[in-house]
Image (tube, rainbow, N blue to C red):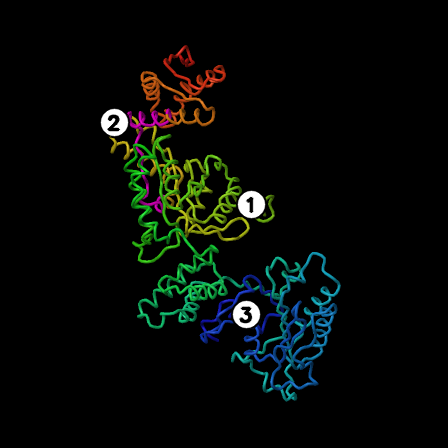
Amino acid sequence: MSALRPAWLREFDLSLPITAQYLVTGNVHDLHLDGDDGHFLTTVDALLRCLVENAYDLVYRFDPLEGILLDHAGAGVVSNDFFPDAHLGRATVGAIAKVADLALQATAVSHLRVALIIDGASALWVDDISVEVSRLMLVARRLAARDFVVDAVDPLAARVATSGSGRGVSPRNAVIWVGDAEADAPGWLREADSTRALRVPLPTLGARRQAAMELLPALDGFADSDADVRGAAIDLLAATTQGVTFRGIRNIVALARDQGTAPGNIDEAVRSHLLGVVDSPWHDPHLLARVQGARESVQQRVLGQARAVERSLDVLLRSALGLTGAHQGRRRGGPQGILFFAGPTGVGKTELAKALAEVLFGAEDAYIRFDMSEFSAEHSEARLIGAPPGYVGHSAGGELTNAVRERPFSVLLFDEIEKAHPRILDKFLQILDEGRLTDGSGSTVHFSESLIVFTSNLGAVDAFVESDRDARQRRILNEIHRHFTTELQRPELLSRIGDNIVVFDSISAATGAQLAERYLDAVIDTVRLRRGVALELQPQVRADLVAAALERLEFGGRGVASVIEAALVNPLARVLAESGDARTVSVRGLARVQDAWVLSVA
């Protein structure tokens, strides 16, 4: 028995002398590498190979679609011993009854080892089992319980006294049920002492590496590459296909061959297979130029945050050059980039995330925002990733997983991350490290093409007592570290974010004045476009509005905007409602009367 044989198949081989019935479930529709001969086998063929090696005389298979087949007949079996025909019956209405009759006849033959493989068993294990299926299961149990007898007079005795495994132990009759899930089988079958459950797992790292060694030579240029390049390609394919079946890996290599992908870029074919898309914006030849030329336009959009803009664009530049994870000496499966925006409210954290989405993907709507204050309860995890099986809404999926599945190329903004429940924060460990997440239905969602952005206000209020900008930054960083390590006890999440924490500056008076001027111009444009009215602000009125807006700088840009709304937009609405058909409104004075603002117009 080869050491490269899958563990579940080795268990099957070793337990044949003592096990009557098997439940083989899990990844049963996949292919398997059995041994070191490089051949991929189906689950049934792998089981059949084991049975033949263990000197079974007859191996029958029942398939709900194909009917009853004789997969193997030993050399010493003659036609009158049993049914030697290659094909015993099509999948007709009476096929189940016929296979039950066949199994019943096999119980009367004591000198032959008989195995019955029932493929597609989950199609038979329904809630309302028919009489025919119930009879089949009872007959199968009798066949499996029938002892194999070695008769010294029997001329076959010498041949069967020692099994093909060389263990000197004769296997008994065996019934193998191959289905999708163990839970599909009837309870009495699952719980019987004579039943062994074998779950076929997804390929392990070692198995994926073995598959890569077998498949990658089909790529153009692989054989001509040096040993280091070939070894790196094999390791890359094995590392990036976690959770992928052998059939999937075979399809990935076929896709790479069709696209002319170089062995060293095999991860591009993996991405195409997992996401279902061929073209990636991250591989756009114009992306590098867009990122390099975006600094000035982004700084104009996010005022007063030159350092934050520069650090954020550096992360994009790294991803555009394919250097994400370069320090690890390999290509990692995590997101394309991770950013943690920290600082006071209203300083442009969300606006910068939108600007990055436009730089990367050419559209601001490639930005998806999640307000994490809505996920402060433990049960809200189901809303984010989907309810588990058996719960209401299971089939609907989760807000996050659905969004990423539909739009894998996006900027994901998790606003006020510190307000999320710690159990929900644990989900980000897998996202940030491996770039994937399993949703409530058990499906894997990949984040490898996303830019992850967190925002936080931690420490921002206390930092205002510091007059020095560097001191404010240190205070905010210390509070973030304390919150994640001491309060949440999630230092591992902070370690995955690494040095990607970007601290935003408070809004200065100069920046506040720029924002106020921008908001005033926006009001003038809106009135012209929506009401057809030319709005004129006298210089002194404009100066008074800007001065009033600067009184609320502690609330950042939002504070400036709220003053413009209260001091200009609200009283202007009253003026426009009373102005009738006037095409021009000139604001000549501004006054605050108690808690309200009043405009003087002409």
Q: Report the disc number at residue 142.
A: none
Q: How many marks?
A: 3
Vertical placement of 326 versus 218: above or below?
Answer: above
Q: Which residues are magenta?
A: 494-520
Task: Work out how far the residue at label 1 is from the one at label 3, CA to CA, in angstroms.
Answer: 33 Å
Mark 1 Cα-neighbour bin, 10 Å: few <14, some 14–19, many ≥20: many
Q: Secondary structure at mark 2?
A: loop
Task: Work out how far the residue at label 1 is from the one at label 2, CA to CA, in angstroms.
Answer: 48 Å
Q: Residue furthest top?
A: 593
Residue tagged 3:
42
**Which one is earlier in the sequence, the residue at label 1 or at label 3?**
3
Q: Residue at x 35, y 19 (%)?
A: 545
Q: Is 249 inside the magenta-drawn segment?
A: no
Mark 3 Cα-neighbour bin, 10 Å: few <14, some 14–19, many ≥20: some
Q: Secondary structure at mark 3?
A: strand
Q: Tell me the kind of residue under disc 3.
A: Thr
Task: Work out how far the residue at label 3 is from the one at label 2, CA to CA, in angstroms.
Answer: 70 Å
Q: Tell me the kind of residue under disc 1.
A: Ala
Q: Position of residue 291 (x, y in %)?
A: 32, 46
Residue 222: image quadrant is: bottom left
Q: Position of residue 426 (x, y in %)?
A: 44, 45
Vertical placement of 540 versus 335: above or below?
Answer: above
Residue tagged 2:
467
